[in-house]
């Protein structure tokens, strides 16, 4: 049984925060969004990460914790100056 979008958001957020692979300098927002008036809810990952590897790791963590809810990753890659 798939998780609700809100429960999936919480599970993803907790999994990202608990990961030792995602360090300081990465700013990730996990939110529930939907496309259109009657669109199915999905999880949107937004923010900034320091490398492509971290972006991939965040995607893998999110997909694993999503419980069947679609995840869209629009994280930007930028270095901390």
Image: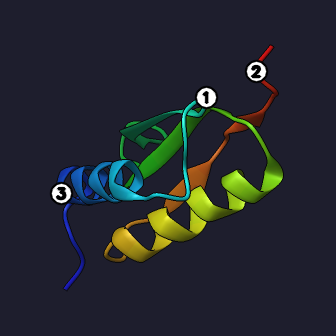
Which tag, 3 or 1, sits closer to the chain's start? Answer: 3
Mark 3 near mark 1, Cβ–Cβ under 8 Å?
Answer: no
Vertical relation: 80 (above or below) 37 = above
- Residue 18 in which image quadrant: bottom left
Judging by the rendered image, the residue that carries numbered circle 2 is: 80
Measured Cα–Cα span from mark 2 to mark 3 = 31 Å
User: Farthest residue in the bottom direction?
Assistant: 1
Measured Cα–Cα span from mark 2 to mark 1 = 7 Å
Measured Cα–Cα span from mark 3 to mark 1 = 26 Å
How many numbered marks have been drawn onto this rendered protein structure?
3
- Judge depth for marks 3 and 1 and give the one in front: 1
Q: Which mark is residue 25?
A: 1
Q: Residues within 10 Å of mark 1 (few under 14, many from 20)?
A: few
Secondary structure type for disc 3: helix
Picture coordinates of residue 80, whole percent (x, y)? 76, 21
Judging by the rendered image, the residue that carries numbered circle 3 is: 7
Secondary structure type for disc 1: loop
Picture coordinates of residue 51, whole percent (x, y)? 79, 45
């Amino acid at each position: 049984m798939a998780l609700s979008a809100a429960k999936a958001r919480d599970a993803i957020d907790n999994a990202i925060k608990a990961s030792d692979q995602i360090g300081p300098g990465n700013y990730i927002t996990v939110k529930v969004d939907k496309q259109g008036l009657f669109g199915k809810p999905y999880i949107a990952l937004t923010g900034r990460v320091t490398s492509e590897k971290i972006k991939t790791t965040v995607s893998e963590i999110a997909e694993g914790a999503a419980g069947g809810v679609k995840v869209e990753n629009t994280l930007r890659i930028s270095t901390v100056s």
